[in-house]
Image: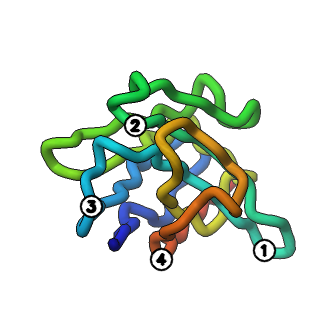
Amino acid sequence: VQLQASGGGLVQAGGSLTLSCAASGFTLDYYAIGWFRQAPGKEREGVSCISSSISGGTTDYADSVKGRFTIFRDNGKDTVYLRMNSLRPEDTAVYYCARGPPVCDYDVEALDAWGQGTQVTVSS
């Protein structure tokens, strides 16, 4: 089981980035995938989640990113994406993807695989 997060970078405020979480070693359809972030000196927080295809592929977003971020999956490519628009300096963090049960759950106890993280830096 492996998750590979990528797509981070440096962008100006108001810009956009798309993060990718490529899965291998398991059937992506059966699991929810969540995106988390951790800024320096802060706790890791759940950003967005998409449930498994068999659970309807429902999406969830933290209030701080609603209307700006979009999560979607391409099961054919075994990849979950996080499209981030209208980025703000406070979005600066290391972003991680993680595998969870079929229905979204941000509790770390429910997550059993993590990607390595990708740095997103938003300059003002």
Which is more N-terminal, label 2 or label 1?
1
Distance between mark 4 and mark 3 Cα atoms: 17 Å
How would you rate the neighbour count of disc 1 (Cα within 10 Å): few for under 14, some for 14-19, many for 20 or more? few
Label 2, on which residue? 52
Q: Is residue 117 left or right of residue 67?
A: left
Secondary structure of residue under mark 4:
loop
| Mark 3 or 1: the one toward you | 3
**Cβ atoms at labels 1 and 2 below 8 Å apart:** no
> Residue at 47% of width from left, 40% of height from top?
102
Q: How is the image coloured?
A: rainbow
Which is more N-terminal, label 2 or label 4?
2
Nearest to the observer: residue 44 or residue 91? 44
Secondary structure of residue under mark 1:
loop
The image quadrant where one finds the C terminus is bottom right
How would you rate the neighbour count of disc 2 (Cα within 10 Å): few for under 14, some for 14-19, many for 20 or more? many
Which is more N-terminal, label 1 or label 3?
3
| Mark 1 or 2: the one toward you | 2
The type of residue carrying mark 3 is Phe
Label 1, on which residue? 40
Label 4, on which residue? 116
Which label is found at residue 64? none
The type of residue carrying mark 4 is Gln
Distance between mark 4 and mark 2 Cα atoms: 21 Å
> Residue at 43% of width from left, 27% of height from top?
55
The type of residue carrying mark 1 is Pro
